[in-house]
Image: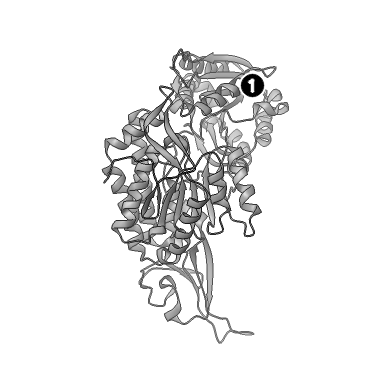
Amino acid sequence: MTTTITGEMLIGSQAVRGTERTQRAYNPATGQEIDEPVFGLGGQAEVNRAAELARAAFDSYRALPLEKRAAFLEAIAENILALGDTLIERANAETGLPAARLQGERGRTVGQLRLFARVVRDGHFLHATIDPAQPERQPLPRVDLRLARIPLGPVAVFGASNFPLAFSVAGGDTASALAAGAPVIVKAHAAHLGTSELVGRAIQKAVKDLGLPEGTFSLLVGAGRSLGEALVAHPAIKAVGFTGSRQGGLALVKIANARPEPIPVYAEMSSINPVFLLPAALASRAEAIGRGFADSLTLGAGQFCTNPGLVLAIDGPDLQRFVDAASAAIAGKPAATMLTQGIHEAYTSGVAKLAAVDGVTQAAQGQPAGDAPNAAQAGLYVTDAQRLLSSADLEGEIFGPTSLVVRARSIDELIQVAEHLEGQLTATLQVDAGDYADARRLLPVLERKVGRILANGFPTGVEVSHAQVHGGPFPSTSNGAFTSVGASAIDRFLRPVAYQDLPDELLPQALQNANPLGLWRLVDGEVKSPGA
């Protein structure tokens, strides 16, 4: 497994140096560029080449036996592990994230590739469904109808800034698209160019070793927005996976919808992830909740899409206990390096804007950044519910370790605020048995507003599993019907096809009478085991 970074793009089986411009990677912890290598940036010509290779590869790749597709995902995971410390060291240099965090993220990345290998093998994602013909049915006979899902086509994936591994080149979007049978073209994020190339070469090697069509995977690097815009606009691309800002996500949605053939953009965008502190829980453990909240808020310099950016509770002495405990914990938190200079500038600007709103007071600050470049100082602010309801400036996401506590006068006012909030990825209830009546009133609102509701924890940390939902109503995502994490993420890149009265020999294997894939299938409305 090669560990050499050359600054080239990976287009099919080739390494290609872009000629549009050049760029060096950046170390946010030092504020300096990384000297070598220099990355060549691509443009429309490289997009065209990668997209046409993906188009050519589509039918061959999706027709592979499920076992070979699963083995491909597992080979990518093994190749990533084979990069060893080189991958961790490069990611650390490009992001400022500590080695332990990156090792955990590598484990998550490998784990989700292996999860999707299992999803492919079990075949449930195909939704094989058979309604046998009923020629004697009256008043009209029923035709033979069979349904299975196929991939949409080549998928464009945009690497995320805040997860250089798990939401990047071999992250959840790539893994779920490849599992669906779709070739993938990744646009590397400028915040981790070398890390992206290393992982891209791990995927490229797996493609070669398993003899897959070369257009199964490509990795592009481009300056600014032009390459990504060209990628989304290319007619060979049939879906897009994106994690980033609301502005960026909506720009891609606009391009996708303006195409002669519009395509879906699955964009995870912005969320402030409200935390509701209900009265009995607050009375019994305000200090413990406050300390746990401070840890969640400052984890990874607050650079998580599930960061708890809003806390809501009924005003009183117990809420003040929480604020005091959280403030004391935050005051001891050191400033932490943010991923990029741009993220740091946006964070400081967002905090300044929040602090300037009339009726908002500062409760705590973390340790100052001093001379450290791009280091974020944590913060906690307090306001009241009526101020939040009347000020749009208090509802925007601050991407970093700052949160706002909102004091409400009653459970009715808490519910009013919940109704007012935009769509979110998560909502958290700190709840004890004495709060269940209030929780039952909140839950129907939260079910309409968020993708994941959790109790007595904090939203940072997203388990990769079959039951996970990492999505939510707009603007947390561009399509609240889907998740970008967990086994169901594959659904984004599939569509159903019905086959009416086709001879058995022409049907997909998933629908043939002999069931050669050994699938559980829905037959005439009943779930049937492989042997049935």
Question: Which residue is depicted at the point 46% across and 48% down?
Answer: 186
Residue 26, picture quadrant: top left
Q: Is residue 440 visible?
A: no
Q: Residue at x 50, y 19 (%)?
A: 378
- Residue 428 at what x, y percent from top left? 53, 34
Measured as percent of width and height from the top left, residue 44 is found at 53, 50
Numbered label tally = 1
Q: Relative to 271, is 61 on the left or the right?
A: left
Disc 1 crowd, CA 10 A, few/some/many (<14, 14-19, 20+): few
Coloring applied to the structure: one colour
Whole-percent x, y for residue 119 in the image: 39, 56
Quadrant location of the C terminus? Answer: bottom left
| Closest to the observer, 309 or 36 | 36
- 351 relative position to 409: left or right: left
Q: Which amino acid lies under the numbered mark 1 shown in the image of this protein?
A: Lys
Occupied quadrant, residue 312: top right
Circle 1 is placed at which residue position? Answer: 353
Q: Determine the residue located farthest toward the front in the rendered image.
A: 19
Report helix, strand or loop for mark 1.
helix
**Residue furthest bottom in the image:** 136
Q: Is residue 327 above or below residue 87?
A: above
Please tell me which residue lies in front, 251 or 18. Answer: 18
Residue 299 left/right relative to 395: left
Q: Is residue 142 visible?
A: yes
Q: Of residues 255 and 285, which is closer to you in this image?
A: 255
Coordinates of residue 49 in the picture (x, y in percent):
47, 56
Q: Residue at x 50, y 80 (%)?
A: 502
